[in-house]
Amino acid sequence: MKLYYTVAAQTDAGIEKRVNQDSLTVKVANTPYGEAAVAVLCDGMGGLTQGEIASAVVVRAYEQWFLKEFPAALGSSGGVPDVLRLRESWDTLANDCNARILDYSKERRTTMGTTLTVLLLFQGSFYISHVGDCRVYHMTDTGHKMNLLTADQTYTAREVALGHMTPEQAKNDARRNVLLQCIGTVRHVAPDFISGSYHFGDSFLLCSDGFRHELSEREMYDYCHLALNGISWHADCRQENSRVMDGQLKYLIEQNKNRMERDNISAILLKAAGS
């Protein structure tokens, strides 16, 4: 079966902040081996100056990688991504961005940083590189599942994993947004790498922490996946379906704002279909 992708993306400064420090992109490209999709979401550090510059630098770097380097890599590997080389390439790119941002900050005597979450979909496999606390969810019809693929790299998430704090305590802890690493503030970043498989009909949601604080996973699943069932996902309907998906994301962003979420709010939605 031939896989293709319908995508949508929305971002909002929110109810309090004057500047939106989030940056994002989502791209779909044809290759000799079928369609590929990449989504990148970066949350510039709200407590640091010029976080929007740091997030934009990283998003542009991964976008250019997808447009220029990914096709060449497929050609040299016979159309199947080499997982080890992919991870090495992404790790190198993350640390190149890290060095650029550190140099920029030093020159201007300022501090800036950003999270990084990148998702690549190709031939039924997904690949993720992750730094920080944006999230990637994989949504399926089977069992109405919304699977969290990434782990938050935060102080509270670490404490929960160690058994020092309950999830309920972490949710209300003042340190819930304290990151263990982010691009632009450390000498070296070590992104998490996650890979796995998906099927036609599955959906993926990338979201910033501002998108998920005031929403339940049930709400996100219902509006970002379940509500899309019954729609014709033929390739000729992509433009119309993308508008529907955009509308679902806008609705959830407004729900966050109505519930007084104070952070920037961003999300990317991708749907895999087949013919």
Image (cartoon, rainbow, N blue to C red):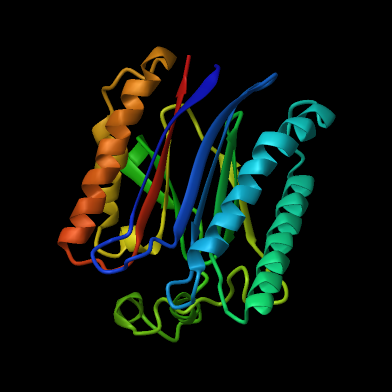
- 159 lies above or below 126: below
Tell me the residue at 15%/60% (across/down). Answer: 258
Q: In the visual, does 160 lie left or right of 18?
A: right
Q: Nearer the viewer, residue 225 or 188?
A: 188
Q: Please indicate, yes or no, whether residue 152 appears anywhere in the rendered image.
A: no
Q: Which residue lies furthest to the right in this view?
A: 76
Q: Quadrant of residue 66?
A: top right
Q: In which quarter of the image is the N terminus?
A: top right
Tell me the residue at 74%/61% (across/down). Answer: 96
Q: Please state the horizontal and vertical placement of residue 32, each as a whole percent of the image.
A: 70, 19
Q: Please state the horizontal and vertical placement of residue 200, each as a whole percent of the image.
A: 46, 26
- 211 lies above or below 261: above
Tell me the residue at 23%/64% (across/down). Answer: 15
Q: In the visual, does 219 lie left or right of 46?
A: left
Tell me the residue at 48%/80% (across/down). Answer: 155
Count the marks: how many? 0
Q: Please state the horizontal and vertical placement of residue 35, each as a whole percent of the image.
A: 59, 24
Q: Residue furthest front?
A: 108
Q: Quadrant of residue 122?
A: top right
Q: Which of 152 and 67 is in front in this view?
A: 67
- 102 lies above or below 56: below
Q: Please indicate, yes or no, whether residue 39 appears anywhere in the rendered image.
A: yes
Q: Please state the horizontal and vertical placement of residue 71, each as a whole percent of the image.
A: 73, 30
Q: Which of 75 and 25 is in front in this view?
A: 25
